[in-house]
Image (cartoon, rainbow, N blue to C red):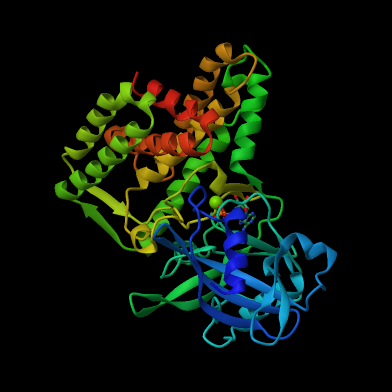
Amino acid sequence: MTRLEQLLADWIPRQRWFAGKGVPIGDVRIEDEYTLVPGEPGLRLLVVDVDQRGAHSRYQVLLGLRPPGTLPADLVHAAIGECEVDGSGARAVYDATHDPDLTAGLLDRIARGTPRGPVRFRRLPGTAVRTGLRSLVLTGEQSNTSLVFGEEYVLKTFRRLWPGHNPDLELTAALAGSPFVARPHGWIEVDLDEGGRRVPTTLAMLQRFLRGATDGWVLAAISVRDLYADLGTAPGDAGGDFAGEAERLGAATAAVHRSLARELPTDVLDADALRGLAGAMVERLRAAAAEVPDLEPYTDTLRAAYDAFARLEEPLPVQRVHGDYHLGQVVRADTGWVLLDFEGEPAVPVGERQRPSSPLRDVAGMLRSFDYAARHQLIGHADEQRLVPVARAWARRNRDAFCAGYADGGGVDPEKHRTVLRAFEYDKAVYEVMYEARNRPSWLRVPLDSIAALSA
Ligand SMILES: Nc1ncnc2c1ncn2[C@@H]1O[C@H](COP(=O)(O)OP(=O)(O)O)[C@@H](O)[C@H]1O
Ligand SMILES: [Mg+2]
């Protein structure tokens, strides 16, 4: 490894967006390197291959360069180290997403649509992009790094890279003009190697920033908190009742699903394909139960639900869907609900994420999220025992409202497709069991209690 690669091997695992936490990093190799802004401060785009016990993953690093010892105080937290970068002496290297003097160049190039060597900056036809805005890194994110330019645009830089167009760009562009998505303005791409072929790969997406929009998870959590503070009140009578929002969210979801089905390919899954999907669910259950013994009492019920799914009489309509749908992926703007982050699960290769799926998978994801919103505040609550039925009532009420809004908004009626919905809900809950057991054991009860309640 070069000195820069050694510095990255130390820095990458400490980043929030690094997906491989828990497994030690072996080698880090800079696979591709492009100068985006020459001089000092300078900006280099790195495609970095990370080897963890033979499993390779790629990440995007935007590297800032300045003369050694000259990092301004407000960039010290973004420092990576000092090393030789391009054969012209040592440099201070740092995470350039925190340097508005450098990121301004990215917005500028998208606005003009001019390439920089092999790196292509694209503006969507019919949109204008205002330049000269300073960027701030959006906090509270999980898997990527988003820059907000003057409260007008968000430039989402994808950290984990897979060869191909990112579904976030693909779907947001297909939905351009919809009131339920933040308008896309442009993107950055470069070719990435895939088995000797160079494949156009999305590095970043520019879209409208929704000023003053509130995260769906935050709104739901406030509603739950109000209800728990007022023991004895039914969810429907509480001042912070969420059901109206849940119903409108259902309708917005249905509208987006209908648009996606109109704009992008659809298909139907035959009996063989259904058996394949059910088989994958059974496999995930087996793996989870081996790791989390508390799941064991429910495995028969879950298997029975997957069997019923595998034996469905009618073929299952599939289309492009959100793929990682929950309350943290929607925001309430002045105009209503807006869906964000159509990337799917960043840990899954792009080709797989582009495969059509049942829209009920998204519905199940949101229903699981209602359950989480209600149950996670029970953990450690002084009145926990008395609140359990209240949590159930809140989740039930908002689930029903969401499903009603979804059906009224032109989606299939989830209540009429219980076998499909239940299989997806269980499958998601099993995934959550694994996730919580590994990352957040104190929350493991949330999906386990849900599985117990669902199978009662
Ligand atoms: N266009 C936008 N307008 C307003 N807020 C946004 C916008 N895009 C993202 N956000 C905020 O940033 C959060 C993370 O964005 P998201 O695209 O979901 O990134 P990640 O892939 O890291 O989850 C969102 O939950 C939302 O609160
Ligand atoms: Mg997200």
Drawn side of residue 221 relative to residue 276, left or right: right
Of 141 and 373, nearer the camera is: 141
Q: Residue at x 33, y 36 (%)?
A: 421
Residue 116, horizontal then vertical, whole percent:
59, 86
Of 379 and 224, nearer the camera is: 379
Q: Quadrant of the C terminus?
A: top left
Drawn side of residue 358 relative to residue 57, left or right: left
Above or below, 274 relative to 454:
below
Of 66 and 361, nearer the camera is: 66
- Asked if residue 133 can be seen in this view, the reply is no
How many marks on residues?
0
Residue 99, horizontal then vertical, whole percent:
74, 69
Above or below, 70 relative to 392:
below
Of 212 and 161, nearer the camera is: 161
Q: Residue at x 83, y 68 (%)?
A: 72
Give residue 293's quadrant in the image. top left
Above or below, 426 relative to 16:
above
Give residue 66's quadrant in the image. bottom right
- Asked if residue 68 can be seen in this view, the reply is yes
Q: Residue at x 59, y 83 (%)?
A: 113
Residue 344, horizontal then vertical, whole percent:
44, 54
Residue 400, horizontal then vertical, whole percent:
45, 29
Drawn side of residue 281 relative to residue 257, left or right: left
Give residue 390's quadrant in the image. top right
